[in-house]
């Protein structure tokens, strides 16, 4: 009986503390909106891949990581990984390309698990300035992929809150995804941690608007049935379902794919409902559903925290590894 009373008191206290900390580490609407309004503003001129405006976005994301308390893991003690190399541009052939990634690291606290790395990513570039549509030539890329960058920042805030997770978490914003993933390819050749240590990658792409093909509060995961990562995250509270647009081959269309081809269990989280503003100047902040975005990010906090603290190592389903 005494034990039960003590247990009851302990549970009450524990639940109170848990509820209080959950409140503090939940997502912040004003932070989400503020970051979106900067990244997708006309001032950033559409964050064109490899250019000065992409660098502005990179510098902003780096400063945010600093403020949050994430350690730098780029070049020379900073957050930015400078990319300068020759890449194969399919139609145009090989050419020199300069871009940059932003890399931050939250060191795991568990001696046995800290060498295992969870990789959370988004791409910081978009299409820049281009052909005018209805008098607008700035391709702001609010949904694609300022929304993903902001999701990764919010996850960084939540994970850095109070004590670090047991596993190490890397936060990476890739440059030049829109031109073929040059930032990502360079990252794979110059990783800040051994690639074999990365147990899972979640790329966040286009979560700024709801997809009517799934329930309003759901997100989908590309290649859901290829590994046990999606189902396991769903078991731990993620409102994650299979990609309802298999004909679009989204698993192969983002930065997760190059990682997956290296063997890393890597998928993209999205709620892109094939809206007509895709890759048009009208993909701007005025078309973002901030309520959806907040709920979407919030729904991933608990499951990602669980993943960063667990021993669970996701695996490819037999025959489904790309
Ligand atoms: Zn994108």
Image (cartoon, helix red, strand yellow):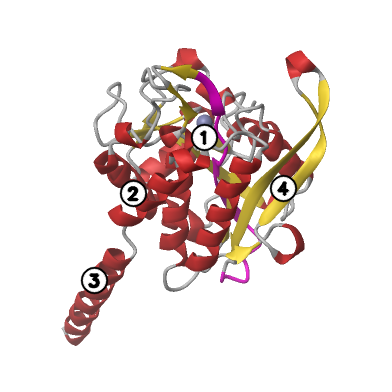
Q: Residues within 10 Å of mark 4 (few under 14, many from 20)?
A: some
Q: Residues within 10 Å of mark 1 (few under 14, many from 20)?
A: many
Image vertical order of residue 249 relative to residue 254, above or below: above
| Left or right for 14, reference 198 | left
* Position of residue 295 measured from the top left corner of the image (x, y, whole percent): 28, 45
Q: Is residue 17 magenta?
A: no
* Position of residue 17 measured from the top left corner of the image (x, y, whole percent): 27, 75
Q: Could you say which disc has been placed on residue 195 in the image?
A: 4
Report the quarter where the C terminus lies. Answer: top right
Q: Secondary structure at mark 3?
A: helix
Q: Is residue 55 visible?
A: yes
What is the residue that sits farthest to the bottom in this orientation?
2
Camera-nearest residue between 152 and 29: 29
The answer for how far apart the CA atoms under marks 4 and 1 are is 31 Å
Residue at the image point whose x is 19% and y is 80% from the top: 4
* Position of residue 135 measured from the top left corner of the image (x, y, whole percent): 41, 20
> Is disc 4 in contact with disc 3, using a CB cutoff of under 8 Å?
no
Report the quarter where the N terminus lies. Answer: bottom left
Image vertical order of residue 62 relative to residue 134, above or below: below
Between circles 2 and 3, the one closer to the viewer is 2
Camera-nearest residue between 45 and 99: 45
Query: Which region is colored magenta?
Result: 109-131
Between circles 4 and 3, the one closer to the viewer is 4
Instruction: Compare marks 4 and 1 and give the one earlier in the sequence.
Output: 1
Q: Secondary structure at mark 4?
A: helix
Q: Would you name the residue on which mark 3 appears?
A: 15
Q: Secondary structure at mark 2?
A: helix
The answer for how far apart the CA atoms under marks 1 and 3 are is 45 Å
Residue at the image point whose x is 51% and y is 23% from the top: 250
């Amino acid at each position: 009986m005494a034990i039960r009373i003590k247990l009851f008191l302990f549970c009450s206290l524990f639940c109170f503390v848990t509820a209080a900390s959950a409140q503090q580490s939940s997502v912040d609407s004003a932070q989400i909106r503020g970051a979106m309004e900067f990244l997708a503003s006309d001032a950033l001129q559409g964050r064109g891949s490899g250019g000065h405006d992409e660098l502005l976005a990179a510098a902003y994301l780096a400063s945010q990581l600093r403020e949050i308390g994430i350690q730098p893991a780029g070049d020379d003690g900073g957050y930015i990984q400078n990319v300068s190399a020759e890449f194969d541009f399919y139609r145009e052939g090989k050419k020199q390309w300069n871009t940059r990634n932003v890399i931050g690291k939250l060191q795991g606290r568990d001696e046995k698990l800290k060498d295992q790395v969870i990789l959370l990513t988004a791409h910081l570039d978009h299409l820049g300035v281009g052909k005018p549509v209805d008098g607008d030539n700035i391709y702001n890329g609010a949904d694609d992929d300022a929304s993903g960058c902001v999701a990764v920042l919010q996850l960084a805030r939540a994970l850095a809150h109070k004590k670090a997770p047991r596993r190490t978490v890397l936060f990476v914003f890739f440059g030049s995804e829109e031109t073929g993933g040059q930032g990502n390819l360079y990252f794979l050749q110059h990783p800040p941690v051994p690639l074999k240590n990365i147990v899972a990658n979640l790329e966040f792409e286009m979560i700024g608007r709801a997809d009517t093909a799934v329930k309003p509060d759901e997100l989908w995961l590309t290649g859901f049935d290829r590994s046990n990562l999606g189902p396991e995250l769903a078991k731990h509270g993620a409102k994650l379902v299979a990609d309802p647009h298999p004909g679009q081959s989204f698993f192969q269309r983002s930065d997760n794919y190059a990682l997956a081809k290296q063997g890393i269990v890597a998928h993209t989280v999205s709620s892109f409902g094939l809206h007509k503003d895709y890759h048009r100047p009208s993909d701007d902040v005025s078309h973002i559903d901030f309520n959806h975005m907040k709920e979407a990010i919030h729904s991933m906090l608990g499951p990602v925290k669980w993943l960063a603290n667990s021993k669970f190592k996701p695996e490819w389903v037999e025959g489904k590894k790309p």
